[in-house]
Amino acid sequence: MYFSIVIPLYNRPDELDELLESLCKQNFDNFEVIVAEDGSTLKGDQVVQKYADRLNINYFEKNNSGPGLTRNAGAAIAKGDYLIFFDSDCIIPPHYLSTVFAFLETSQTDAFGGPDAALPTFSPIQKAINYAMTSFFTTGGIRGGKRSMEKFHPRSFNLGVSRDVFNQLGGYGAMRFGEDIDFSLRLIEAGFHTALIREAYVYHKRRSTFRQFFKQVYNSGIARINLHLLHPGSLRLVHMLPALFVTGMALILIATFLLPVLILFPLFYCLMVFIDSARTNRSAKVALYSIAAAWIQLTGYGSGFLVAVWKRLILKRGEFRAFEKKFYN
């Protein structure tokens, strides 16, 4: 069994260095690496050259088109039985590929993925963002680490798929945001099987500032409505919860002028996040940052969702997105 690891890259040579170094430490060696440079101004060619004698690695440059179409370009030259897509800000544990190989030897699946986690060396803000993206208190558990009553939807920071299946589906669509969810939905709608390999986790560095994080989740909220229009029936209650949170908290804050005791509701939420994050991360500093990250996660996603409802469902406008120039950031 041969794996092709495809990495879309945009202005992140330092992170690519860490990712490639982690791939050198895999205890399974039957794989190739393909780095697709997506119109970067800070190129990763010298980083790739550094690993030319340690990895079977291919590198090419292309015009900027976003990560989905860049993954397609990398997949087009892949030779593996399975394609594995990583984001450039991931670090891969040494057991990852051997874990996937063992799973595929005993279980038939067309596509797979795993959770993401945080390393102890990550910054307090990155740990707080990781908490917000994976916590029950922010609906983050839907990303892959928690059990779900619906079929597993792999996310492309950590996604593997049979090359034949990938080609049958025509790869990723042209969406710049939500393209990985669109791909997973098309997988399932076409009758293919997906699997969560819980031990095949990656360390995901995520955004390094709250401003970048807000842009990411705001566009994710917009993308959810775009996905709803592409895949009717894919919208679930859990996807609406951040919008309900934004609406509910706005109403509570307005009502506090008449009934000040209502301010206890958002304060109680902050306390619950602080306690849970402190228990999880064993750090009061990370727990304090987690309060901010949780509010950004819910209000950013929720406000993007509500804006998209207004523009796309009520005004019937075409697909749109925000912060286009900073897509990878």
Image: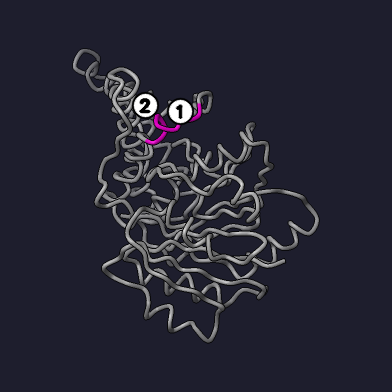
Image location (x, y in percent) of residue 129: 39, 50
Residue span colored magenta: 223-231
In the picture of the structure, the residue carrying the numbered disc 2 is 243
What kind of secondary structure does the magenta stretch mostly adopt? helix
The structure residue drawn at horizontal position 56% and vertical position 42%, both measured from the top left corner, is: 184
Q: Quadrant of residue 274?
A: top left
Please indicate whether residue 317 sits to the left or right of residue 102 in the image: left
Q: Residues within 10 Å of mark 1 (few under 14, many from 20)?
A: some
Check disc 2 and report its element: helix, strand or loop: helix
Mark toward the viewer: 2 or 1: 1
**Viewer-proximal residue among 167 and 319:** 167
Q: From the viewer's perspective, is 294 left or right of 157?
A: left
Question: Total label count?
Answer: 2
* Residue at mark 1: 228
Q: Nearer the viewer, residue 121 or 102?
A: 102
Q: Amino acid at mark 2?
A: Ala
